[in-house]
Image (cartoon, rainbow, N blue to C red):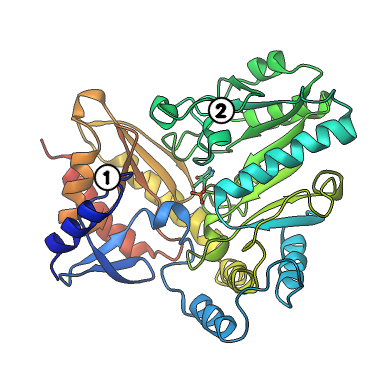
Amino acid sequence: MTTKEFIELEERYGAHNYHPLDVVIERAEGCWVYDVEGNKYLDCLAAYSAVNQGHCHPRIVNALKNQAEKVTLTSRAFRNDQLPLLYKELSELTGYEISLPMNSGAEAVETALKAARKWGYKVKGVPENKAEIIACKNNFAGRTITIISFSTEEQYRDGFGPFTPGFKIVEYGNAEELEKAITENTVAFIVEPVQGEGGIIVPPEGYLKKAYDICKKNNVLFITDEIQSGLGRTGKLFAFEHEGVRPDVVIIGKALSGGCYPVSAVLSDREVLGVFKPGDHGSTFGGNPLGAAVARESLKVLIEEKLIENSAELGKYFIDKLRAIESPHVKEVRGKGLFIGVELKPEAGGARRFCEALMKRGILCKETHENVIRFAPPLVIKKEEIDWALTHIEETLKMA
Ligand SMILES: *Cc1c(COP(=O)(O)O)cnc(C)c1O
């Protein structure tokens, strides 16, 4: 079948909740993906940072295969021999006492919000049904009804009300506004250390530290959504490390499975996740042995192959080189590690046409909002591959 035929099938039989580039991928390896016509592309999106370890990493695929032949799902009605090891390894790696596994990122966000509310009632002593959670303008945390209830993106909400109450919005990057928004019923502040879907927005230096201190002072949980910014993407294990804070709750997903299987988790000390009692919360697939085995290997690959260091080093190199490109269209280049956004001027005609031009040259990236091109390749990328991409990016950014 041809590209055109696959696209026709998809358009005819699928719901149109995405607007993908017209490339039909049939296999992938490391940083590279191959379409059904035999064309090869450098993947500069990495499935929104879920394939930080590179596509089809042999060690992760092996872990998946081996576990798939043993046992895939027990449900949490019984125990399995992978989940306890994932718990232990996550705790040793991150320093958090306990964790709670889910599948998608959105489910992990929901889990963190539920934990925060329960903590508010049982530990902080907030009156019943009064808990407030503060989130930031321009956030992205998933697509469930509760999560879009604190989205500020019109399209994400349009037609989906009524919304879940209990959320307040403050300006991202403005710690003073956060402080003013806190009341005695505030239980948590949830924040992305770098806003991903919002356009790779890096907050002013010192913001996270200030916000963290404000939360500590007011007995408010500081929750970071590291689903996209975590696990090496910004050149640290977690993006919050750039400011030396230790959130009360950390949410991870995406690269936790190296893109091989949906696995997410919430991390905290016992004080927060300890509020859950048997029956309070759960998921049929959450913590399944297949996902746990894949996550264990994905974390090992991230550390043992020094992908976090590679992200720091090559991210800096990539950003410096992008900044040196003289293009009439570029407004700003920003990012941390291999989490990079090139914002175009409003008159550049939108990022989509540049992404389409890059695709023709063998580079896959995706516009983020109207005017931002995101570069976030798998963390296994090599300097030569970045250099190759840069020549094409430079020529593309100089086109009329
Ligand atoms: C992708 C993402 C989510 C949602 O994850 P899903 O697996 O798509 O549900 C939540 N928060 C952030 C910051 C994300 O980038």
Is the residue 315 above or below the residue 216 in the image?
below
Hey, which quadrant is residue 223 in on the image?
top right
Distance from the alpha carbon under mark 1 to that under mark 2:
24 Å
Q: Which mark is residue 19?
A: 1
Is the residue 245 above or below the residue 160 in the image?
below
Assign a secondary structure to mark 1.
loop
Residue neighbourhood size for the residue with mark 2, other residues' Cα within 10 Å, grouped as few (<14), some (14–19), many (≥20)? many
Q: Position of residue 220 (x, y in %)?
A: 78, 29
Q: Position of residue 302 (x, y in %)?
A: 57, 66
Left or right of residue 49, residue 265 in this image? right
Q: Is residue 388 visible?
A: yes
Kind of residue indicated by mark 2: Phe
State which tag comes first along the sequence, 1 or 2: 1
* Residue drawn at x 60%, y 74% as measured from the top left: 290
Ligand 1 is within 8 Å of the C-beta of the residue at disc 2: no
Q: Position of residue 121 (x, y in %)?
A: 84, 31
Q: Nearer the viewer, residue 214 or 337?
A: 214
Residue position for label 2: 150
Q: Is residue 242 visible?
A: no
Q: Position of residue 7 (x, y in %)?
A: 19, 57
* Residue drawn at x 70%, y 26% as measured from the top left: 210
* Residue drawn at x 68%, y 68% as measured from the top left: 75
